[in-house]
Image (cartoon, rainbow, N blue to C red):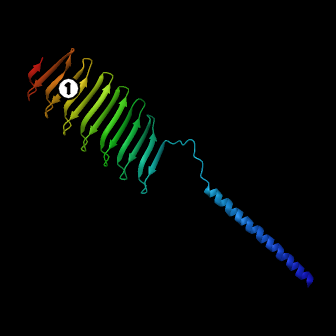
């Protein structure tokens, strides 16, 4: 009987040691697993793609980065999918467009090898103003609500020129510099001259 009791005592001690080792192993495994999940991955140095889309909670694209054979583009849309901002570049030109919530362009800024241009549109899509520049100088146009040019400012080798037209598009007043001398010309509603200075 003593032999059986001694043997039973040894088995109980071995079982306690085995339980202790198993418990330590379980705690170690849990600690390693949790420390692996808690690590923040290091940022990548380079991410390359031909197109990247960022979507909202409904899965609609709100930002799109893309490229093609001419260059790259960035488009930012509202939740309805209408384009509000677009940046595009080509081999020798660039364009930025800002639109209304419906996506209708309101302002466009562009440049190419010849110069730069800013166009401003009304909510109906008609051009209301333009400001541009090239190697010869600058120009500005102001349009009426129909989109017809009624005020123009231009420059050339002689100096500047201002033109004011009626709603019919016919010039009414022209003032500027010609051959180094200033002049003013006033026209009637038929576009015929009714007076000039000098």
Indicate the quadrant containing the C terminus: top left, top right, bottom left or bottom right. top left
Question: Measuring 35% from the left and 45% from the top, which residue is drawn there?
Answer: 84
Q: Using residue 101 as the reference point, say whether residue 188 is left or right of it.
A: left
Question: Measuring 25% from the left and 37% from the top, which residue is drawn there?
Answer: 127
* Above-or-below relation of 169 to 74: above
Residue 65 location (% of width, % of height): 45, 43
* Above-or-below relation of 177 to 97: above
**Which residue is at the front of the view, 31 or 120?**
31
Q: Most extreme residue toward the bottom, as rendered?
A: 1
**Which residue is at the front of the view, 123 or 25?**
25
Residue 2 location (% of width, % of height): 92, 83
Q: Using residue 195 as the reference point, say whether residue 151 is left or right of it.
A: right
Answer with the quarter of the image where residue 174 lies: top left
Which residue is the site of mark 1?
Answer: 162
Question: Measuring 28% from the left and 31% from the top, which residue is drawn there?
Answer: 131
Question: Measuring 16% from the left and 19% from the top, which residue is drawn there?
Answer: 183
Badge 1 local density, few (<14 within 10 Å), some, or many (20+)?
Answer: some
């Amino acid at each position: 009987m003593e032999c059986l009791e001694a043997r039973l005592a040894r088995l109980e001690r071995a079982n306690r040691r085995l339980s202790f080792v198993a418990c330590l192993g379980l705690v170690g495994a849990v600690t390693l697993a949790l420390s692996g999940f808690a690590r923040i991955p290091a940022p990548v140095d380079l991410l390359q793609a031909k197109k990247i889309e960022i979507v909202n909670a409904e899965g609609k694209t709100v930002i799109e980065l893309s490229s093609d054979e001419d260059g790259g583009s960035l488009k930012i849309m509202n939740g309805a999918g209408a384009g509000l901002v677009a940046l595009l570049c080509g081999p020798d030109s660039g364009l930025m467009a800002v639109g209304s919530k419906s996506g209708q362009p309101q302002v466009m800024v562009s440049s190419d090898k010849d110069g730069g241009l800013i166009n401003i549109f009304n909510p109906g899509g008609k051009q209301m103003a333009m400001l541009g520049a090239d190697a010869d100088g600058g120009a500005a146009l102001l349009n009426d609500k129909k989109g017809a040019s009624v005020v123009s400012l231009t420059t050339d080798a002689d100096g500047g020129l201002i033109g004011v037209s009626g709603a019919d598009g016919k010039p009414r007043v022209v003032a500027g510099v010609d051959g180094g001398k200033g002049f003013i010309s006033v026209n009637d509603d038929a576009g015929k001259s009714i007076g000039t200075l000098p």
